[in-house]
Amino acid sequence: MRILKVIILFLVFQVSAQQGGMWIPSLLEGMNESEMQSLGSKLTAKDIYDVNNSSLKDAIGHFNGGCTSEVISPKGLLLTNHHCGFSQIQSHSSLENDYLKDGFWAMNFEEEIPNEGLFVEFIVRIEDVTDAMLKNVSDAMSPREKQSQIDKNRNAVEKNIVKEEWQDFKIRPFYKGNQYYLFITERFEDVRLVGAPPSSIGKFGSDTDNWVWPRHTGDFSLFRIYADKNNRPAKYSKDNVPYTPKHFLPVSLDGVEEGDFTMVFGFPGRTNEYLPAVAVEQITQKLNPSNIAIREAALKVIDASMKADDQIRIQYASKQARIANAWKKWIGENQGIEKSGAVEIKRQFEKEFVKALTDQGKEAAYGNILPEFEKLYKEFETVNVKRNNFVEVFLRSNELMQMMFRLVQMENTANRGEEAFEKARMSMVNQLKGIHKNYNSAVDKGVFEAVMPLYSSNFDASIYDNTAFVNLESALKLLEGDSKTVLQKLNDDAAYQYAKPLVLEFYTNLEPEFQRINTQINALQTKYMKALMEVLPEERYFPDANSTLRVTYGKVNGYAPRDAVYYNPVTYLDGVMEKYVPGDYEFDVPQKLRDLYEDKDYGPYADKNGKLPICFLGTNHTTGGNSGSPAIDAEGNLVGLNFDRVWEGTMSDIYYDPEICRNIMVDLRYVLFIIDKYAGAKHLIEEMKLVHPKK
Ligand code: ARG
Ligand code: GLU
């Protein structure tokens, strides 16, 4: 009997160990710690997160608010993805110094390039402030009353925060607002570019291979954090010095193999794991298809222009990557939701929830949640889709419309007086300068012709011939003068005349209606989360990603995407050569790398069979924002750099299926090999601490 119980427990453990989840680093003691150890980890919860001693978390930095990065040397050397440093690399590139195409390597501190606006933020401490934030908040309150009480509580909490004067803080809701955590942070603003491989390595396979396994991309770049003389955060200054971190990650030369424990530590952006089935249906059947169509139309134009002209290729590199990335992800997400039967599984789960409600006599408290979701999402559908499409067209794909959107905002400040208008005008001038740095009106006109018909039947591309805004000089000229003069000229501009009614429709109809329903949906989702945790307490609940620091763990593992197909979890340099297409914009391979391959000149970076590993797969539950996150081995060493997920598993933001959801990491040995053998930047390797944990 006892043995049986142990076996059952063991089985439950084995299964639950594969369920995914993104966990709060300060709460790992207990379930997570033992689960990690059952997967082979030698780390304690305190090794990962400790307030009083340095711990792994001190090496993990939020990179520019979007990606993750980690410190890998005592001199503040910072590792992240190539695609995370992409816009910085692009910004320093020109036809003469094409760092996108050729790569960039600083051979000493002096050659490292400052990046205006770039920052890296570390977490000093995490505190549960739920009680204080939800004080005097009750279920009987309306969403608005609730919010105003929470705002009041927030002010009180903020007054009592204990922190050093150079530190910052943020308070974030978890579990849909049922819990709140406070983060004390340190933000470094002098972050310099140190190294980047050519795109033919850092972006090898480009969009064809994006979100796809098997993968052969060396998706990494290097930066360095600088601090003031007291090792504190400081704005850029030539007097700043390399930052001395509280902790930096040692780098393993032994790597990991199938079955080995891995942990990914980073800042996942957003997931939606607790949506009702009806919401998932709306996303996959309505939202995704229309957004995919808009991006596909934009990409056709941008891709063709980039291939035809090197100047445009550099100008549009970041924009294209951003548009293409989500476009392809949504396609995979839809297929994954379909194939895994996620909607049906959610419906089934909802039945269990209703049954548990009945069994526990809680229908009065929670019985209306699911019917209410059905009703609200039905009401939401049209406005939700329309608003999303507006955002896609006006804010994501077409730049002239983006300018118009902001110009309408500028015009709206005029009724607040001349001073407010002047401020808005100045800001507009700066925004226009920013947009025009990488603007080509012919490309943008092509995009307009492609995407606008998908939003409005009223479209007229001749506005491009009669607007001041396709050219920076004439745009700035139009913006000269007081509010009356500027607005007169503006309202005579053809593009403005065309766009203004559409933007006003957004502000007066779409957005308020969207917000009205969305507020109700959010309030209901808060209640649903609370009900789930109360009524089905044996389920595993991790808080949805919200751009805060999380730990996710699993093991190196292949997967079987369809009948008779099994994917091995590791790729090798041989695979790069298999994909090599001379001169191709996605699959070219630099001569130097081909030579190194011919000579098998892998130095200490080959695996025990003499092969050079490139990428590997794990069962770590990751999402956008985890890019650049370290993959850490059982003893706390760096073995990989997270950068993607597999196509069949991109639905994991909504529904995590342990069978086929995998994250993709670059093997650190490939990163070291490129730095050392390809770039000849051995001085960077010498800064690091290389270890052999398996010897
Ligand atoms: N799919 C990865 C991520 O979500 C990598 C993106 C790199 N961009 C690209 N268009 N290849 O960010
Ligand atoms: N490439 C993604 C990022 O930029 C990570 C991949 C994912 O979404 O899992 O964060």
Image: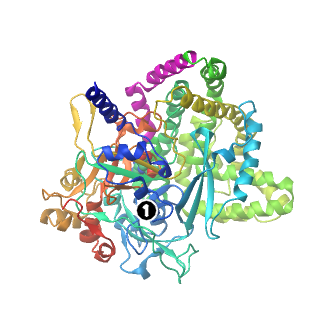
Q: Where is residue 119 in the image (x, y as percent from the top left)?
A: 54, 65
The image's colour scheme reads rainbow
482, 660: nearer the viewer: 660
Q: In which quarter of the image is the N terminus?
A: top left
Is 655 above or below relative to 87?
Answer: above
Image-quadrant location for residue 568: top left
> Taking the image as drawn, is residue 301 in sight?
no
Ligand 2 closer than 8 Å to the CB at disc 1?
no
Instruction: Tell whether 432 sits left or right of 148.
Output: left
405, 570: nearer the viewer: 570
Taking the spot 52% from the left edge, 32% from the top edge, the residue there is 274
Is 146 above or below relative to 374?
Answer: below
Which residue has dot 1 on it?
A: 55
| Residue farthest along the bottom direction in this orientation | 239
601, 688: nearer the viewer: 688
> Is 343 part of what is drawn in magenta?
yes
Magenta stretch: dominant secondary structure: helix
Q: Where is residue 408 in the image (x, y as percent from the top left)?
A: 74, 50
Q: Give the range drawn in magenta.
A: 329-358
Taking the spot 28% from the left edge, 46% from the top edge, the residue there is 556
Is 8 above or below relative to 48?
Answer: above
Instruction: Tell whether 102 sits left or right of 270.
Output: left
> Taking the image as drawn, is residue 453 in sight?
yes
Image-quadrant location for residue 143: top right
